[in-house]
Amino acid sequence: MLNIVLFGPPGAGKGTQSERLIEKYGLIHLSTGDVFRANIKGETELGTLAKSFMDKGQLVPDEVTINMLRSEVLNHPEAKGFIFDGFPRTNAQAEALDLFLKSIDTKISVMLALEVEEVELRERLKKRAEVSGRVDDANPEVIQNRINVYNNETAPVKTFYQNQGKFVAVNGIGSIDEITQRLFEEINKL
Ligand code: ADP
């Protein structure tokens, strides 16, 4: 199986690039943000809970997120592999993911980290707010919160994969096509 963690701060382009990667490698795209948003739209219990955190730019609690992720993976027994987009976002999530994948006889192949500096991220999120309709894109305070959460809780997850020799940084500045090519090159080296 090819299991990729696509990593990067909010606005790094994970969603856009995931679409390209699933097409090329026949993977299942699992975006925790998308699953939460679908639950909010469907007015499920999970949606109501997730919304209370997401609207403030905070993380949904680990236990809730991990359980949701597990059941999404188990829903695709036929998968050739997965792109994890927006997960793991804390060291606890990374540890839980490792254990879970081991229990179903597979593992993470690589973490591809899209690197984009903060000034550019703010610009992209501002533009996205005009079209995404996302509450968490529209408010500068919420955006700042998400960037802070990324720096404090999520960025350390890099070290987790570095320690396993699975961390690869990819320049996330350039045209969408250029960045896709950089990701393809890294995956083809595996
Ligand atoms: P972005 O990375 O652009 O901020 P996402 O769609 O990945 O957008 O995530 C939106 C929100 O969903 C996050 O700010 C957070 O509240 C919640 N979320 C997504 N993934 C996770 C996760 N792995 N753990 C906890 N909360 C998450």
Image: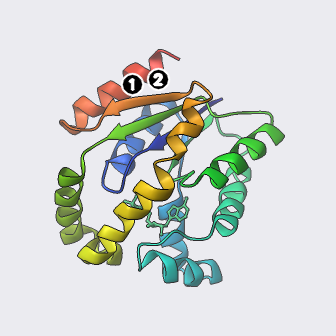
Q: Secondary structure at mark 1?
A: helix
Type of residue at label 1?
Phe
Question: Front-most of 79 and 98?
Answer: 98
Q: Residue lying at the far top in this picture: please name it.
A: 189
Q: Quadrant of residue 152?
A: bottom left
Above or below residue 3? Residue 39 is below
What residue appears at the point 38 percent right and 66 percent down from the top-left corner? Answer: 146
Question: Residue 104, can we see it?
Answer: no
Between the C-alphas of marks 2 and 1, the distance is: 5 Å
Above or below residue 126? Residue 105 is above
Q: On the picture, is 88 further left or further right than 114?
A: right
Q: Which residue is mark 2?
A: 187
Q: Residue lying at the far right in this picture: please name it.
A: 103
Q: On the picture, is 105 further left or further right than 7?
A: right
Q: On the picture, is 129 further left or further right than 48?
A: left
Q: Secondary structure at mark 2?
A: helix
What residue appears at the point 47 percent right and 38 percent down from the top-left corner? Answer: 22
Question: Residue 162, can we see it?
Answer: yes
Above or below residue 32? Residue 46 is below
Question: Front-most of 68 and 161?
Answer: 161
Residue 106 image offset from top left, x and y in percent: 74, 33
Check disc 2: other Cα within 10 Å, few if <14, some if 14-19, many if 20+: some
Residue 183 image offset from top left, x and y in percent: 38, 28
What residue appears at the point 62 percent right and 28 percent down from the top-left corner? Answer: 164
Type of residue at label 2?
Ile
Check disc 1: other Cα within 10 Å, few if <14, some if 14-19, many if 20+: some
Q: Which residue is mark 1?
A: 184
Q: Quadrant of residue 186?
A: top left
Q: Looking at mark 2, is its residue's CB closer than 8 Å to ligand 1?
A: no
Q: On the picture, is 80 further left or further right than 180?
A: right
Asked whether the residues under the numbered discs 2 and 1 touch, taking CB atoms below 8 Å apart as contact, a structural biologist would say: yes
